Amino acid sequence: MKIKLRGHHLLCLQGFQGYGYSEDFITKMTRINELRKSEECSVTLTNEPDDICLACPNLKNNLCENEKQNEIIVKMDNEVLSQLTSKEYNSIDLFNYVSSKFKSMNDVKNICNECKWADKCLFYNKLIE
């Protein structure tokens, strides 16, 4: 199976614990989070709306909320994607690599610090400890 993911969602999925913008979004995020843990899953990376975004109520005209918010999201994506060399990965390998690259608050300061889910994110809170 193949999934398409934004750069910043590589971090979000590691800290996801069932919160989201809507029930549809939570269901989609939960499903993608399950799929990404499979050896048979491959990931195509992007800095545009991905498989998770398709269920987000904030996605309008292929933008996250509005142009300004979308620019912030794309910047977050690009920060993560700058640490990767390809667009296609085995999901397990990808998430192992991302975990090894983003392991301190300094590594995520330009990505997670403005996130409204940071207080609920297990990935982010692990870095605080």
Image (spheres, rainbow, N blue to C red):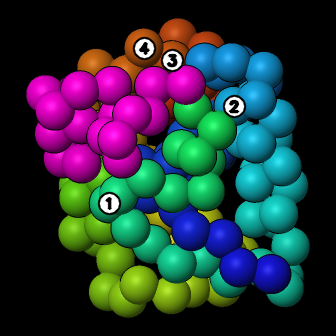
> Residue at 78% of width from left, 21% of height from top?
23
The part of the chain drawn in magenta is: 57-75
Task: Find residue 25 and name its label.
Answer: 2
Instruction: Count residues near mark 2 (Cα–Cα under 10 Å), then give few for <14, some for 14-19, many for 20+.
Output: some
Callout 1: SS: loop
Instruction: Count residues near mark 3 (Cα–Cα under 10 Å), then give few for <14, some for 14-19, many for 20+.
Output: some
Label 2 – label 3 distance at C-alpha: 14 Å
- Disc 1 or 3, which lies upstream in sequence? 1
Callout 3: SS: loop
Residue type at the position of mark 3: Trp
Which residue is denoted by mark 3 in the rendering? 117
Q: In this view, does 40 lie above or below 70?
A: below
Which residue is denoted by mark 4 in the rendering? 116
Residue 109 in sight: yes
Q: Quadrant of the N terminus?
A: bottom right
Q: Where is residue 93 in the image (x, y as percent from the top left)?
A: 64, 80
- Disc 2 or 1, which lies upstream in sequence? 2
Q: Where is residue 101 in the image (x, y as percent from the top left)?
A: 40, 63
Residue 65 on the magenta segment: yes
**Horizontal relation, residue 5 to residue 37: left or right:** left
> Residue at 31% of width from left, 67% of height from top?
81
Q: Where is residue 110 in the image (x, y as percent from the top left)?
A: 20, 37
Residue type at the position of mark 4: Lys
Residue type at the position of mark 1: Asn
> Residue at 23% of width from left, 26% of height from top?
66
Q: Is residue 51 above or below residue 65?
A: below
- Which of discs 4 and 2 lies nearer the camera? The answer is 2
